[in-house]
Image (cartoon, grey):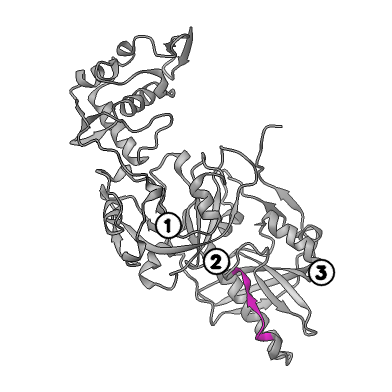
Amino acid sequence: MAELKTKLGTSIQISDISGLIKSLRSVATPLTKQHIYRAASQYDKVEGKVETYQDSTDYDVIVDSNSFPPKAVLGLALSNYYGVLIKSSHFKGGRTSECFHILRELGFEIVKKSGLIPMSKREDEIFSYSKIVVGESHTKLEAYGIAGVRVPPRSRDISGVARFNNCVVLFVTLEKGIKEDAHKYNDKFFRGGRMFQWESQNSNTPNTPHMQMIIRGLPVVLFARVHEKINSRSQPFIYVGGLEYVDHRYPVDSRSIPIEVEFKVLEHNTPILSPLFEWANGINQDEKLINVTNSMLTETSAPRSSAQSAVSKGKAKRNGKIDWADSDERNRNLGLAGEQLVVQHEKQKLNDLGRSDLANKVEHVSIENDFAGYDILSFSEQGIEKYIEVKTTRQSKVTTFFISRNEVDVSIEKDDLYWLYRVYGLNESTGLASFYSLQGPVDQNFELTPENFKARIK
């Protein structure tokens, strides 16, 4: 007979024939009302996305005047208590089931769903997003009502991504602190709100229907909020408006990693959206857009080879000391400030050389294309193109930094046309910063240290 080993050092017996827990009532004996309350709260936090469970079809259990699927709530309570995954397939639901009996014995009412009528599929409905004003705040239910689509009875019945006939709708909470690790998707605005990164659920692939719509460039609209709750009160979503698909990353056919999609934010000039744009995960909120208009950038020599900064590919978690490379990488506003300083420097240098014609052609490429593999297009005095990647830190010139595989590949492709500008010692209060530059492929100028890998079964 199969069994589940629990964190308590006991075992839960599973029938080899039916796959069901033997004597579910005995297994559930230690549960109290508080275990059910906590499970219901957890169900709300993950918006009903409980592994192996689906919403109920005929009955609900009432917990604090709210309706929940009985099997999912009991399964969560048992999983939490025993520290082992209790799957939906491990027990049955239904009017005469042990599951219902256990919940009733604990004092919870189970009611039959009312008004069950056939419902149209979401993908057949038209979500009229033109009726919603950018910057306005709405709950999920309010947004559905304004857009003229069927409104479900509860907010948690609306998933974070929905596919309609005319568009894909995203509801995103940026701060993931209260979420379980499996649901801490890396969703964020960057480039001062010009761009938005969104991660799909792990179960999605590029062939998932709503992902196909996104990748094909069909309309995508975004509702976002920073916090799910403030003082225990659910927060509404702010309508950000339309997103324009730029690119996505999904290097292997795997259901264990999310698809990372990058969009242009079409309404990024809307001031009321600034609180969303300025939020950054793991970055203090005082680290906002840095004004470098009057700052001075001074060129210095590169470190000697023996002391030259190592470059890390990917991101690693450190224990103990602060990982300045990781901190710099996550601070998008610091990176943007360094790029703006280099743009100013390149234009001024060309103007001083009497090449104002070339100065006018200097382009801040990464503002519009974050996948180019370089940040700035500039020129030498002779008019030769310079593809410049900028890496910025407030620390010293030998501080390590992260560089992507794409940036390394582009540096090899561009060869001597590629330049890396290392901006360091950036100090907003004094308006001073320094930089050194190195020409050519990154792997010829720096020691590249792999920090992590994506793996698949051989």
Q: Is residue 169 visible in the rendered structure shown here?
A: yes
Q: In this view, does 123 lie above or below 136?
A: above
Q: What residue does disc 2 label?
A: 334
Q: In which quarter of the image is the C terminus?
A: top right
Q: What element carries label 1?
A: loop
User: How packed is label 2: few (under 14 Cα within 10 Å), some, or many (20 or more)?
Assistant: many
Which range is magenta?
359-366
Sequence order check: which comes first, mark 3 or mark 1? 1
Q: What residue does disc 1 label?
A: 166
Q: Is residue 297 above or below residue 283?
A: below
Task: Give the x, y percent position of residue 107.
Answer: 18, 23
Among the 4 quarters of the image, the one containing residue 142: bottom left
Q: Which residue is drawn at 46% across and 67% down?
A: 288
Three-letter code, disc 3:
Asp
Given residues 168 and 91, the one toward you in this image is 168
> How many angstroms separate mark 3 from mark 1 (CA)?
47 Å
